[in-house]
Amino acid sequence: MMIKIEEITHRFGDTVALDDVSFEVAAGEVLGLLGPNGAGKTTMINVLSTLLVPDHGRASVAGHDVVAQAPAVREMIALTGQFAALDDVLTGRENLVLFGRLRSLSKRDATRQADELLERFSLADAADKRVGAYSGGMRRRLDIAASLVVAAPVLFLDEPTTGLDPRSRAELWQVVRELRDDGLTIMLTTQYLEEADQLSERIVVLDHGRVVAEGTPDELKQMAGGQACVIMPVDLGQLDECASALSSFGTPVIDRDIGSVTIPDAGPGVVSGIIARLEGIDLSDISLRRPTLEEVFLQVTDQPGGTHTSTESEIST
């Protein structure tokens, strides 16, 4: 395993930020670390990047203990934090050369590496512009490039797309995919569930400092139940009639706000049977829907809208 975390606990005074956390990340894998604000995501990144010493437990990166062998760990990692660590007065090229020089590259090697990274991250045309004039997406790409001035097999990305517009976010997703294809091991913290779904091969969900769910995106979606069949009659006055007619397929859930009846955990071939059972009722739509990561997130974390709160939908009995 490239990253191994065993029973890590860390406190800030009386606040438990990480509570007996354990998980692993394989070499070349992209792992999404999800959780609400204050769940412990950034604290976990800081422990793994040697910025914090845990109170209990053990963690290693590329076989090096993050406490006992911290200098060796730092040689193996690249870190992009939540806020770009760039000098707005310098140009894009000057920023990268500066980072290279700080990492002990010669001026020639730092310049060559800067030019290669600017080209790779589609910033060559803006190489000689001051970073203060860059868009948010350009700044984030440059920030990741700065982290990679000296090659490292492990990359930590702490909420890299926060505040970016959809186009810039999509561009950064492509950068992450390319880095994954190059064989980097990537740990990505994010609050964007679609981002985790798009990029992560596995996901760990933290809440109140503890691991509350772990698995591939598909495995986590199965936690929210199988695919659901959503039926929308033309006449909303027939919602109860639809629900009654479909009770043999499961426990129908009526949503009067959107005018639908949902059959959870609908099995294969259920649509034809439902249509036959609803003969004489005009439908505006019928569809199969897989659970989303958002539904999983709300179920396993203590968030409004999850299983810890009531819902507005009715269960037909």
Image: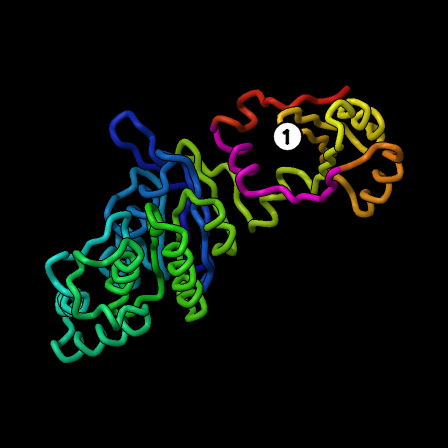
Left or right position of 238 against 83 = right
Q: Residue at coordinates 25% horizontally, 72% vertically from top-left? A: 125
Q: Residues within 10 Å of mark 1 (few under 14, many from 20)?
A: few
Which residue is at the front of the view, 273 or 218? Answer: 273
Question: Where's the C terminus, which quadrant?
Answer: top right
Res 242 quadrant in image: top right
Taking the spot 35% from the left edge, 66% from the top edge, the residue there is 153
Identify the image quadrant of residue 310.
top right
Left or right of residue 87, residue 158 in this image: right
- Quadrant containing the N terminus is bottom left
Q: Amino acid at mark 1?
A: Ile
Q: Residue at image x 82%, y 47%?
A: 269
Percent coordinates x, y for residue 264 in the rendering: 72, 35
Secondary structure found at label 1: loop
Q: How is the image coloured?
A: rainbow
Question: Was residue 307 drawn as part of the magenta stretch in this picture?
Answer: no
Q: Nearer the viewer, residue 111 or 131?
A: 131
Residue named by callout 1: 258
Q: Which residue range is magenta in the image?
A: 284-303
Q: Where in the figure is residue 130, as x and y percent of width and height? A: 15, 62
- The foreground one among 235 and 49 is 235
Question: Percent x, y for residue 8?
Answer: 37, 41
Q: Residue at x 17, y 66 (%)?
A: 129
Residue 297 included in the magenta stretch of the image: yes
Image coordinates of residue 224 in percent, x first then y, are: 62, 37
